[in-house]
Image: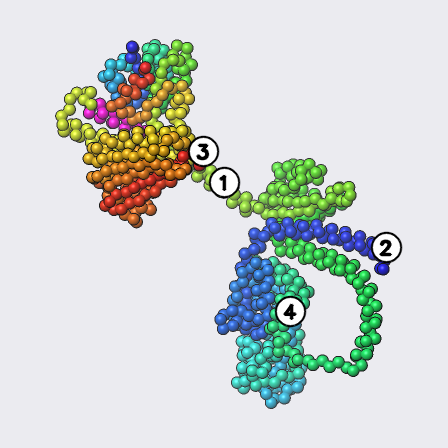
Amino acid sequence: MSRRVLVIEDNEQNLYLTEFLLTRHGFDVDIARTGGEGVAKAQTAKPDLILLDVQLPEMDGYEVAQTIRRHPELFSIPIVAVTSYAMPGDQEQALAAGCTGYIEKPINPENFIDQIEQFLV
Amino acid sequence: MLQIGPADRSREAALSALIRFWFVKALMAVLVIACSSVALSDIDVRVGVYDNSPKEYVDDAGVARGLFPELVDFIAGEEGWTIHYVPGTWTECLKQLEAGEIDLLVDVAYSEPRSALYTFTNETVLVNWGIVYARRGLHVLSLVDLEGLRIAVMRDSTHTVDPGGIVDLTERFAITCSFVEADDYTGVFQLLADGEADVGVVNRIFGLQFESNYPVERTPILFNPSELRFALPKGGPLTPYLADRIDSRLIQLKANPQSVYYQALERNVFVSEQPAVVVRWPPWLVPTLVSAGAVIAALIGAFMVVRHEVRQRATAEAALRRSEERFSLAMQGASDGLWDWDIVSGRVDFSPRWMGMLGYAQTDLPPAIETFHSLIHPDDRPRVSALEGDYLAGRVDRYEAQFRMRHKEGHYLHILSRAFLVRGEPDGKPLRMVGTHVDVTERERVASELETAKERAEAADHVKSAFLATMSHELRTPLNSIIGFTGILLQSLAGPLNEEQRKQLSMVRTSARHLLELINDVLDISKIEAGELQVTSESIDLHELVSEVADSAIPMAEKKGLVLRTTIGSGVGSITSDRRRVGQILMNLLSNAVKFTLSGEVRVDCRIEGAWAAVAVTDTGIGIKQEDLSRLFMPFQQIESGLTRSYDGTGLGLSICRRLVTMLGGSIEVESEPGRGSTFTFRLPLQRRDGS
C-alpha cells in the first residue's frame, strides 16, 4: 500500500512539523506552499492523501479542494482539511468544498498519524 | 296628533345634514384625540392657590381646598392631569403667573388691564362683588361716609386696584381717605379688629362667611361685580390647551344642575349666604291651583305628544354640541393639523395648526387642494398623488402616507397624513376627504439616528467577531508548531531526552495547552455573544456520551489521585440535543471538579427526571462560598477572584457552560459548601425543539 501524502501548507514551521511526523512514520511526503502549487503537485505526484491547510494565500484551501474534486484524474484522492476551528462554519465549509474530513489545529502529535491512517483505509 | 308640516321636514333635513356634518367632524376629532393622546395625557399642571376662603385656601394639613381647588381636582381627574398646588400670597401668585412659574391660577377676577397681562378662561366660575365692612358701631351707609377714614384693602385685589375698585371709586367721588394694605382678606378683617383701619374691603363671599368672627358690620356699599375665572400665563406652553379644556368642562358642569360644580358651590359658597327662607302660601293660591289643575291636565296630554319630538331633538342637539366641542378641541388644542377637502368644489379647509406646522398663517395660502399638493416634496408627489387617486377610486381602502412637505422657511418636514372619505348617498360618490397631519420630523430624525447607530454597532460587532476569529487563527498557527514540536520531542521522535529536558518540555506543553484552552474559550464566548454559535438538534445516546466523556477524564483524575465514579440511571437513553456541546459542558464540569479537588472523589450521576435528563458532577473539593455562588457563572470570575495562581483555568468554563445549557433549552445550578465540595447539575430537555 502506497503512502504518499501531499502537504499543502504556507507556514514554514507547521509544514516542517507535519513533514517530520509523516516522514518519521514512513510516509512519502510532497510539499506545496500555495494553493496553485498544491494543485500542480497533485497532478504530478498523484498522492494517496492530501493534507490541506485551509487558510492559504492567493487560492485558499476551499478553492484547492474544489479544483481537485473537479479534476478527472484527481477527484478520488481523499483530502483532509487542517482547520483551526476558528471561523464559524469553516469545517462545514471544508466538507462542502469537497474535503473528505478534517483535523483540528493544533494537531496532536500523539494521535496525528492515527487520524491520517483513517483516511487511507 | 301633531302634524309635521313641510317646514318641519325641511328643518329636519337640515338638521340631519348638520348631524352628518358634525358626525364627520366628531370622527375626525376622535381620530385626532387618539393620535395625540400620548401628547396630552400625563400632563403636570402647577396651580397657584392663595388664601381666599371659601373659594380657595390651604388647610392645616397643607391640602388645597375650597370651590376652585375642588373644580380643578375634578377637571384634572377627568383629563388625567397631575396637579401640583403652589401656595402663596395673592401677590406672589400673580408674580408666579406672570413669570410662567405656575400654569394656572385659581380665582382671578377678569378685567381689561389684567387680560393684557394674563390669559383668562372664557368661562366665569362665579360673579363676586366687593363689599365694605366697618368697625362695629361706625355707621357707614354710603360711599361718602368713607371720607377721612382709613380703609383696609387687600394688596393687588381687583376690588382695590382695578377700574371700579375702591381706589377708583373714592377718587371718582373725590373722597379723601387713606389705605392700609393687607396680604389677604383675613388680614383686612384683622386690621379692623386691631383698630388699624376704620373700614375694610373684602369680597362678598368671604365677608358673608367670616363676618361673624370679627367685630365688624356689613355696610350697604356693594360695588365692582367681578367675573371670577382661571388665569393662565400668557404664552405658556400649556395655556391654550388648559384654557380650552377648562372652558369645555365648565360649560358641561354648569349645564348640569347635579354636577360637581353646583355641589361645590353649595358646599363652599352658599352655605352661610342666605338665611333660611320660610315660604308661606298665600290663601288665594289654593283655589287658583285647583282650577289651574284642570287646565294643566289638558296641557299634559299635548305635552306628551310634543315631548317625544322635543326629546329627540334635544338628544340630537346635545350630540351635536358634543361633537362641536370635540372638534373645536381638536382644531385648537391638538398638535395635529387638520384638512377637509370638499372634492366637489375643490375647496380645502386647513386648520390653523395645519398651516402653522408649515410656518404659515391661515390666510397665507389659498384654501385649495393645489396648496396641499404644491407643498409636497417633488420626489414624494407622484407617490402621494397615486395613493390619493387609488383611494378616491376605491382601489385601496386606507389613506395613510408619510411624505415631506416644504416649510415656509424652505426646509422639509416629515408629515404623517391620514384621512378618510365621506361618500354621498345613495351613489357613493366621494364628497369630502378629511384628514390629519402629524409632524413626525423629529421621530424620523431619531429613527434615522438610531438606524445609523445600529448599523455602526453592527459593523463594530462584525469587526470584533472577525478580529477575534482572525486572532484566534493567527494564535493557533504558532501554537500548532509549539505543541506539535513539543510532542515530537517528548515522544523522542527526534532523539532521546534526559529527565530535566523531559520535565521542562512537559511544562512547555502544559502552558501551550492552557493557552490553547484560553483561545478556544474566548472564541466560544465571543461566538455565543455574537449569536454565531449554532447548536444542533440530533438524536444522541446520552448514556454512551456520558460514559465516554467520564472515561476520558479518568486519566486526569487519576493523575491527582482522585477516584472518578460514574452512575448512569437505567432509564437514560437517547435525547435530542447537540452531542458536541453536551460533551463540552460535561467535560468542563469534570475538569473543574478535578482541578479544584485535592483528595477524595469526583462523581458523575446521570438520571431522568420527568421530561428532563439531569447530569450532576459532585466533587469533594474546596467548595464555593455562598456569596461567590451568584458570580460563578459570569465570565472571568476565577481570574478576578485571583485563584488562577493555584488553579489553572480560564475562568470562562462555567460561563460557557451556562450559555450552552441555555441554548440547549436547559438549566444549570450549583450547590456547594466550602471545604466539603460542590455539586453542579445541568438539566436538558429530553426533546429539544429547534430554536428553544
The structure residue drawn at horizontal position 38% and vertical position 30%, both measured from the top left corner, is B574
Mark 1 highlights which residue? B451
Q: Do badges 2 and 4 share one subunit?
A: yes
- Res B278 → quadrant: bottom right
The structure residue drawn at horizontal position 28% and vertical position 32%, both measured from the top left corner, is B550
Mark 3 highlights which residue? B690
First of labels 3, 4 by sequence position: 4
Q: CA distance from mark 3 to mark 1?
A: 30 Å
Q: CA distance from mark 2 to mark 1?
A: 66 Å
First of labels 2, 1 by sequence position: 2
Q: CA distance from mark 2 to mark 3?
A: 76 Å
Q: Which mark is residue B6?
A: 2
**Image location (x, y in percent) of residue B68:** 59, 68
Q: Quadrant of the N terminus of chain B?
A: bottom right
Query: Above or below — where is B318 with respect to B386?
Result: below
Mark 4 highlights which residue? B262
Is the residue under label 1 in contact with that under label 3 (CB below 8 Å)? Answer: no
Judged by depth in the image, the label closer to the viewer, 2 or 1, is 2
SS at badge 1: helix
Is the residue under label 1 in contact with that under label 2 (CB below 8 Å)? Answer: no
